[in-house]
């Protein structure tokens, strides 16, 4: 599939995804506005047929075009069902930050990963880490629930405990440290929660809704976090690294807020959650927490308890 056709399909999908009917002329005008292409009725019919071949249910011999059921064009691209991934990734990079496609960063990531793996097959000198994750089969349907703004009921299975049901309004799918998490508002707790997909036995959409704090800026909250655990307070954390480790920290940042504030010392503005603490502990003796004092004391106590395992016990 060439780039121009791919751009047209994106433009058509932007209209049809509203589940409303559009005449051929309306779609032709939308394409002219979005991608500056003036096409014929015949070209439009060919493009519509392409969408049908990808799995979109669009009635034939109707006065207008529409999706009979919701259709995820990007998921089909992610499945490599149609066209060139190179063009798909290039185009999606351009549109993923626009208003119409806001929230599709995860699809872009998976497309890029798929493209990288495809290219790697041509070069046996490149090896990618492959992790088999339980629960990743839930991703497509959860993504659809988020897009359709549907409430879901989840059969959740904590480690070593009995399965119980949770009533969730899903907001975001987030990957961290080779694990996927569903971020959503939970009815019972009346707050944002994260659910690891590997502990979701199953889930289903439900028409049972509930009220929740819609103005809550969850995107900003996760932008100020390492990982997905919703705990701790938002702090300016100062870390001083050893001379040998410091260059690595400067070339691979701990967080996008990272700034150099002194000799081998950085600051990051993040919530003091468990993932932050685990990240600090990964560096062992190569890092010192300078502030806040509460975090410094907690890391010091953790290291003392850890060192106790290695103390030689007297007979």
Image (cartoon, grey):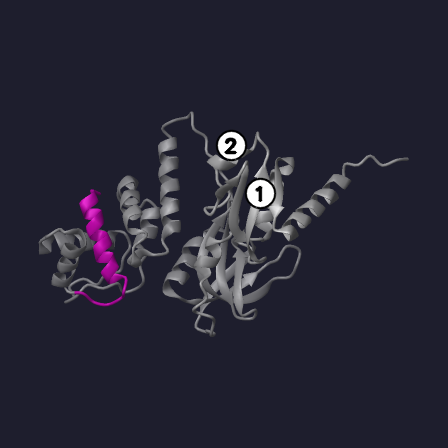
At mark 1, the secondary structure is strand
Q: Give residue 286's mark.
A: none
Up/down of 64 relative to 234, above or below: below
Asked if disc 1 and disc 2 are in contact, CB closer than 8 Å, the reply is no
How would you rate the neighbour count of disc 2 (Cα within 10 Å): few for under 14, some for 14-19, many for 20 or more?
few
Chain-order first, disc 1 or disc 2: 1
Q: From this viewpoint, which residue is outermost toward the left? A: 40
Where is residue 26, by image quadrant?
A: bottom left
Up/down of 38 relative to 86, above or below: below
Where is residue 155, by image quadrant?
A: bottom right
Q: Which residues are magenta?
A: 1-22
* Residue 101 on the magenta span: no
Q: In the rendered view, does 237 fall on the left or right side of 80?
A: right
* Residue 13 on the magenta span: yes
Q: Residue at x 25, y 57 (%)?
A: 13
Residue at label 1? 239
Residue at label 2? 247
Question: In the rendering, at what x and y percent does residue 313 appear?
Answer: 85, 36
At mark 2, the secondary structure is helix
Q: Residue at x 23, y 64 (%)?
A: 66
Question: In the rendering, at what x and y percent does residue 262 appear?
Answer: 53, 39
Task: Please state which of residues 276 and 45 is positioned toward the viewer in this rendering.
Answer: 276
Where is residue 45, by image quadrant?
A: bottom left
């Amino acid at each position: 599939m060439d780039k121009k056709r791919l751009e047209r399909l994106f433009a058509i999908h932007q209209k049809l995804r509203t589940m409303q009917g559009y005449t051929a002329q309306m779609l032709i005008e939308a394409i002219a506005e979005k991608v500056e292409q003036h096409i014929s009725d015949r070209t439009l019919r060919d493009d519509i047929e392409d969408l049908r071949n990808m799995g979109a249910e669009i009635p034939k011999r109707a006065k207008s075009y529409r999706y009979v059921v919701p259709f995820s064009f990007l998921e089909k691209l992610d499945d490599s069902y149609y066209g060139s991934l190179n063009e798909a990734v290039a185009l999606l990079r351009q549109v993923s930050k626009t208003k119409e496609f806001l929230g599709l960063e995860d699809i872009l990531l998976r497309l890029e990963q798929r493209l990288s793996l495809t290219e790697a097959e041509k070069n046996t000198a490149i090896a990618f880490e492959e992790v088999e994750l339980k629960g990743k089969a839930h991703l497509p349907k959860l993504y659809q629930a988020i897009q359709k703004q549907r409430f879901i009921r989840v059969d959740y299975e904590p480690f070593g405990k009995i399965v119980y049901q949770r009533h969730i309004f899903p907001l975001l799918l987030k990957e961290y440290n080779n694990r996927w998490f569903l971020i959503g508002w939970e009815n019972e707790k009346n707050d944002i929660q994260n659910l690891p997909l590997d502990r979701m036995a199953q889930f289903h959409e439900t028409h049972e809704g509930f009220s929740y704090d819609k103005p809550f800026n969850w995107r900003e909250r996760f932008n100020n976090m390492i990982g997905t655990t919703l705990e701790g307070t938002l702090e300016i954390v100062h870390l001083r690294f050893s001379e040998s480790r410091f260059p690595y920290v400067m070339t691979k940042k701990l967080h996008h807020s990272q700034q150099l504030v002194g000799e081998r010392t950085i600051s990051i503005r993040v919530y003091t959650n468990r993932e932050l603490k685990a990240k600090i502990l990964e560096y062992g003796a190569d890092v010192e927490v300078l502030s806040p004092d509460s975090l410094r004391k907690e890391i010091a106590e953790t290291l003392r308890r850890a060192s106790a395992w290695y103390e030689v016990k007297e007979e």
